[in-house]
Amino acid sequence: MREKVILICSECLARNYVTTVNKSNGKRLELMKFCKYCNKQTLHKASK
C-alpha cells in the first residue's frame, strides 16, 4: 500500500510537491528539489 506525502522546503517551509511512498518503509523521504519560492534547489522533507 502506498501513502501520499507532501514535500516541504526546509528553508522557507513552503509545501511544494505531492508524491507517494511505500508505507512499509520506516524512513522519512528527503529529496533535493527546486523551490519556486526560494528560486533555488533545496532539501525537501516529507511531512506527516
Image: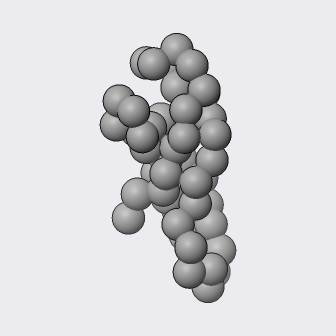
Nearer to me, 40 or 36: 40
Q: How many marks?
A: 0
Left or right: residue 48 versus residue 44 is: left
- Above or below residue 10? Residue 47 is below
Q: Position of residue 19 (x, y in %)?
A: 60, 52
- Above or below residue 17? Residue 24 is below
Q: Position of residue 30 (x, y in %)?
A: 58, 54
Asked where in the image residue 23 lies, by quadrant, the reply is: bottom right
Taking the spot 49% from the left edge, 51% from the top edge, the residue there is 45
Q: Position of residue 9 (x, y in %)?
A: 44, 38
Query: On the rendered image, what quadrant is the C terminus found in?
Result: bottom left
Asked where in the image residue 33 lies, by quadrant, the reply is: top right
Left or right: residue 27 versus residue 8 is: right
| Residue furthest top in the image | 39
Left or right: residue 32 versus residue 9 is: right
- Above or below residue 48? Residue 14 is above
